Amino acid sequence: MSEVRTEESKVARLVRSASFLARIYQNQCHTHYYRMVADYYTHISQAPQKGDFVVAHTMFIPVEILYAMSLRPLHLEYTGYMLSLFTGSCNDMLDRAGEMGFAPEICSSHRLIAGVLDAGVFPAAGAVVCSNLQCDNAIKSGELTMEFNHCPGFYFDYPYNQSEGNQEFILREIKEMIAFLEDVSGHKLDWDKLATSINEMKKQHKLVRQIMGLCQKRPSPFQPQDFLKFLAVDYMFAGEAALTRYLEAFYQELSGLAAQGKGFAEPERFRLMGLMIPPWHFQREIDRVLQQHGAALVCYPNLCEWDEDLPLDPGRPLESVALKWARSPAMRMFGPLDQRALGPIRDSVARYKIDGALNFTHLGCRQMGPANRLFKDVLDEQDVPILGIDCDLVDRNVTSEDEVRAKLEQFFELLEDR
């Protein structure tokens, strides 16, 4: 019994930390963000008492549908990142996964899911939805979650090759997912709620594009660690009014800074592109080093750059959700790595006036290693140096903060000499 109480305290610590940060921040955008995180996990922890139906899911599942069905989403990978960030360390959960037989070469994000399941950190899910985007680890984690929760699951199949029929293919998957969830949960899709969600998504995508437009200004007012929040909110809260309020507050704050000519780095000497995200737990130190060297991280071409024209229509809500995912930046990195992914990197060099690029290579990821060479070739054509840092998004034992700092310092010496 004592072990269960100890593991359950991880959720309480996460909620308590996020709630505390929501109270102490003076600017509204951070308050909105941490309140969303605290509310999300409060709802999850209270699901058994309130009779909420929890749907555990992997990345790139259209949560807009889950919210419109009054289901309680539980994002498996991002929950691991949140636990790592807000509770100090998740190595005990990774150790559990090792005892279960999970090799250290497996992505730590998914080993962490196994440890969390084994520890019973969260209430049981009533259903699981997993996809093949971005990797097959997600499918296996979905299957493991079904096994631990003794519940059914749905496999959301994204098309590997890109074609004109992708949107229709994704639309069929969405309809099948809805039918599955209605059958296992007894909840019906609320079409009015989904239409409202599409309206919110239209506002959200416009705000994202406006915020990225502010990043093109010199100096850029965007703080690098906020890119991680930028990603989390779309994956966890897409279509929710709370997300719109956060983005509105974020845009207003950045607009005010830009109007005053204030930036993250003052003076701004270097403008950097990010390719893959850094370890969440090192981001504060990374920001400190960047600021120390007058460097602003201003874009993530294949994570945050949505199409300029995304004609979402509340009158056709399912088609709009399918369109969003067919045109999502995540789709560029899925399937053959071609100009869909390499083109935005090349174009961003001129648009954001890039001096260098950072690529944090998550060691358990089978995609990022091979992609490094392709990214480097594209940036070499533009005479943009790239720094690759081997790291782990969750496991603090793989790469130390000192190692990351030393590599960044060396990179800035290179930029100084150019």
Image (tube, rainbow, N blue to C red):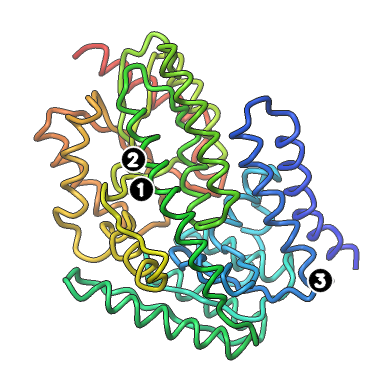
Q: Which amino acid does label 2 sit on?
A: Tyr
The amino acid type, in three-letter code, at marker 1 is Leu
Image side of residue 259 versus residue 306, left or right: right
| Quarter residue 127 falls in | bottom right
Does the image show residue 98?
A: no
Location of mark 3 (residue): 50
Residue 400 appearing in the image? yes
> Residue at image x 25%, y 46%?
372
Out of 282 and 102, give the one closest to the viewer.
282
User: How far across and down, in percent of the image, does residue 176 sit?
Assistant: 43, 86
Mark 3 to mark 1 CA distance (whole Å)? 35 Å
- Say which label, 3 or 1, has the lower sequence index: 3
Say if 183 sits above or below 411 in the image: below
In the rendered structure, the answer to whether residue 161 lies left or right of residue 103 reads left
Residue sitting at 74 percent across and 29 percent down?
24
Q: How crowded is mark 2: few (under 14 residues within 10 Å), some or many (20 or more)?
A: many
Question: Label 2 belongs to which residue?
Answer: 300
Name the side, left or right, on which 125 lies relative to 320. Answer: right
Check the picture and name the quadrant holding the C terminus.
top left
Residue contact at pointers 1 and 2, CB within 8 angstroms: yes
Q: Is residue 381 rendered to the left or right of residue 225?
A: left
Q: Which of marks 3 and 2 is nearer the N terminus?
A: 3
- Assign a secondary structure to mark 3: helix
Which of discs 3 and 2 lies nearer the camera? The answer is 3
Cα distance in 3D space between marks 3 and 2: 39 Å
Task: Please state which amino acid type lies under the numbered disc 3.
Answer: Lys
Residue 271 position in % (x across, y down): 30, 23
Give the quarter of the image for residue 351: top left
The residue singled out by tag 1 in the image is 303
Give the label on residue 146, or none: none
Q: Tag 2's secondary structure? A: loop
Quadrant of the image containing the N terminus: bottom right
